[in-house]
Each structure stands twice: as structure tokens, then as C-alpha cells.
Image (cartoon, helix red, strand yellow):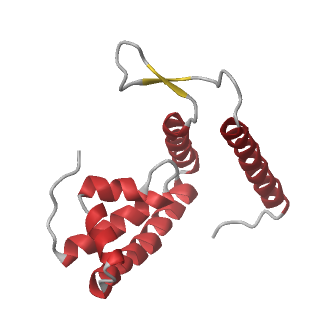
Amino acid sequence: IPVESPLTLLFVFLSGVIAISAMLLPGISGAFILVLLGKYAFILGALINFDIFVMAMFGAGCLLGLLGFSRLLRWLILRFHDPTVAALTGLMIGSLRKVWPWQVPLADNPSLTMLALPNSFSLYDAAAIALMIVGFIVVWSIEKFATHRSVPLK
């Protein structure tokens, strides 16, 4: 449930910091975080109305969050590699349930869904499977290329 949040520029700035930090984490949507903070419609309205000051404050927050949170993630990976990678993997695996393209509502509670496979294949199903395969190949290729060029993190 979205919270009521103040319309101050400081909170717009902080919303930018939090939203961009969420975008750096796998499985978490920065837009969803803005919805939870009650700032999604406000920021979208500022973009539509081209409110330069609000956009600048939000952008500055995003910049600070990007720089700060990426450094924090790097520090965590360097100091606590295995627990950090495990937590990030957990976020990715946890988010798969939400993005799985084939879900069936439960009979006793239609607001809950069960993961399924398609009964018959449509163009949508073929595209979803093709994109899964392409995504796997891209990640695998990047990993294979990165192991040959192993550059130590400093």
C-alpha cells in the first residue's frame, strides 16, 4: 500500500536516491519503489509538465544514489563476496515468480496464482521462450568473455 509522503523537494531528492538504488538491485523495480513512496505520479507529472526544478532534484538524488549505492555494492562484494552474491541471487530468484509469463489463478483464491507451463503455444509463448534463451546466451557469453579477461577489482 503506498504511503502518503510529503511534497517537499528534500523528499523528492531522497525518493531519487532510493529509487535508483532499487534499480541497481536485481529483481527490484525503481518505479515500484516510487509507487510505495507515493511519488510515482508526482514524478511522472513533473516529467509530463517539464518541471525542471523537480526533475533536477530527482535527478540529483538519482545521481547521488547511483554513485553511493554502487560503491556500497562494490565494497560489499569485495569484503563479503559470497553472502552478497547469495543475497543478490535470492533477489533474482525471488523476482522470477512475478515475471513468469504463465501463471494460473488458484480456484479457491483467484488473487493468488500458481506457476504453470503453456497448454498450447502461441506467438507470445514462442517469443517468451526465445527471449529466455537469448537472455541465457547473453549472460553466458558475458561470463565466458569475462573469465578470459579477468581484471581484478580494486
Q: Residue at x 33, y 69 (%)?
A: 44
Q: Where residue 93 sits in the image (x, y, percent)?
A: 55, 37
Q: Is residue 78 left or right of residue 141?
A: left
User: Count the marks: how many?
Assistant: 0
Taking the view exactly as shown, the residue that stands out farthest to the right is: 148
Quadrant (top left, top right, bottom left, bottom right) of the C terminus = bottom right
Viewer-proximal residue, 122 or 129?
A: 122
Q: Where residue 132 sits in the image (x, y, percent)?
A: 70, 42
Quadrant (top left, top right, bottom left, bottom right) of the N terminus = top left
Viewer-proximal residue, 106 or 30?
A: 106
Q: Residue at x 16, y 61 (%)?
A: 5
Taking the view exactly as shown, the residue that stands out farthest to the bottom is: 52
Where 133 sits versus 60, above or below? above
Viewer-proximal residue, 8 or 112?
A: 112
Q: Is residue 125 left or right of residue 114?
A: right
Tell me where residue 17 sits by quadrant. bottom left
Where 42 sits versus 105, above or below? below
Q: Residue at x 47, y 60 (%)?
A: 23
Tell me where residue 11 sits by quadrant. bottom left
Q: Where residue 114 sits in the image (x, y, percent)?
A: 49, 22
Tell me where residue 49 sits by quadrant. bottom left
Q: Where residue 7 sits in the image (x, y, percent)?
A: 16, 71
Q: Is residue 37 left or right of residue 64?
A: left
Taking the view exactly as shown, the residue that stands out farthest to the top is: 108
Q: Residue at x 30, y 76 (%)?
A: 46
